[in-house]
Amino acid sequence: MDKVSFRKQQIDTVNSFMKTDQAQKEINEIYFQLFDNADFKAAKSVGITLSIENEIPTFPIINKCWEDGKSVYIPKTFSDYSMNFVKYERDTELETSSFGVREPKEYKKEILDPPELIIVPGVAFSREGNNRLGFGAGYYDRYLAQYPTKTIALAVSRQFFIKTPWPVFTLDKPVDQIISVAEDE
């Protein structure tokens, strides 16, 4: 199956699953695993997106970072498919990107490229090669090619595969770790 078709199918599958009680149980377990992860604990700066509907909510992670004294950075994307990570605080003024993601409005100060750890979003992940299927624009693949750093992906069971069912290309960047309750299936 090609990436575009698989991505569309995956988004529909995940959107339906995220409305279930099982999804909430899995998300709570994923938070527990992340907060106990050695790389997460050690990182002083964390890059993360502001979640949108039908994604694992990132605000509990952001709040945990702040509680632990970590600096939080969120991506600011540009029309040339590049991005920077900009410091995020409770009073950061936000705007909505063309993809519907909230981003910092002011992005010329307090940039950190790269944060020590990036929690990388995606629609599907596989144990085989720690492959990641993103949302299709290639922002993270380009960013991680330019700014290698530690990466963790969070995946509910419907996002996690043992073998990679989508085509993987040279420019696709794998993640270092995938945290999922489905890892032992």
Image (spheres, rainbow, N blue to C red):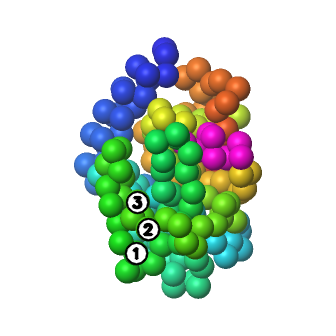
Q: Which residue is mark 2?
A: 106
State the CA–CA distance, disc 3 to disc 2: 9 Å
Above or below, comparing residue 3 to residue 177 in the picture: above
Q: Position of residue 67 (x, y in %)?
A: 51, 85
Q: Which residues are magenta?
A: 139-146
- How busy is the neighbourhood of tag 2: few (under 14 within 10 Å), some, or many (20 plus)? few
Q: Is residue 171 left or right of residue 79?
A: right
Q: Which residue is mark 3?
A: 103
Q: Residue 174's image quarter?
A: top right
Q: Which quadrant is home to the C terminus?
A: top right
- Asked if residue 140 lies in the magenta stretch, the reply is yes
Label 2, secondary structure: give it: loop
> Which numbered disc flags the more N-terminal residue, 3 or 1?
1
Q: Are marks 2 and 1 in contact (CB under 8 Å)?
A: yes
Above or below, comparing residue 25 to residue 12 in the picture: below
Above or below, comparing residue 112 to residue 23 in the picture: below
Residue at 31% in and 48% down: 100
